[in-house]
Image (cartoon, rainbow, N blue to C red):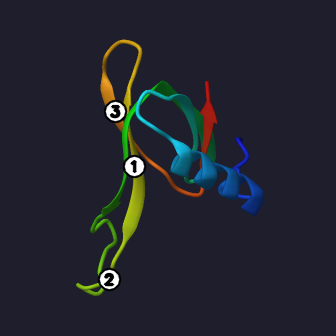
């Protein structure tokens, strides 16, 4: 089972890296996925196209005026595919 990187130090490093990202930066995003008792780590590498903080409605039965935001990175992978990665407490970023 993969261990989830949830220490405050790792979360702060990820936040600082995200805030410093510029279009053209090459990064690798690692994310721990947990479903039931199983966990595994996924990695995605690419070139930053854009970063943004977006409001969304992913939470069930919340008050209609709750403001829920997530940080997103739009990446261009080496094969030209575009992908969007949403950051959470299980995400780490590394510059390449």
Among all residues in the image, which is located at the extreme top? 79
In the picture of the structure, the residue carrying the numbered disc 2 is 66
Q: Residue at x 49, y 51 (%)?
A: 87
Relative to 71, is 85 above or below?
A: above
Q: Residue at x 49, y 29 (%)?
A: 25
Element at label 1: strand
Residue 47 place in picture, x, y as percent: 44, 25
In the picture of the structure, the residue carrying the numbered disc 3 is 83
Element at label 3: strand
Would you say 70 lies left or right of 18 here? left
Quadrant of image for the C terminus: top right
Foreground pick, 62 / 94:
94
Residue 51 place in picture, x, y as percent: 39, 46
* Spatial separation of the CA atoms under disc 2 and disc 1: 19 Å
Quadrant in which residue 84 is drawn = top left
> How busy is the neighbourhood of tag 2: few (under 14 within 10 Å), some, or many (20 plus)?
few
CB under 8 Å between discs 3 and 1:
no
Can residue 37 be seen from the camera position used here?
no
Would you say 38 lies left or right of 70 here? right
Mark nearer the viewer, 2 or 1: 1
Mark closer to the chain start, 3 or 1: 1
* Spatial separation of the CA atoms under disc 2 and disc 3: 27 Å
Foreground pick, 4 / 68:
68
């Amino acid at each position: 089972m993969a261990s989830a990187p949830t220490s405050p130090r790792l979360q702060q490093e990820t936040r600082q890296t995200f805030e410093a990202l510029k279009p053209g930066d090459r990064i690798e995003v690692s994310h721990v996925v947990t479903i039931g008792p199983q966990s595994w780590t996924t990695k995605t590498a690419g070139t930053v196209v854009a970063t943004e903080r977006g409001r969304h409605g992913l939470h069930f039965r919340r008050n209609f005026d709750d403001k829920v935001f997530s940080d997103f990175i739009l990446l261009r992978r080496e094969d030209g595919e575009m992908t969007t990665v949403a950051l959470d407490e299980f995400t780490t970023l590394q510059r390449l």
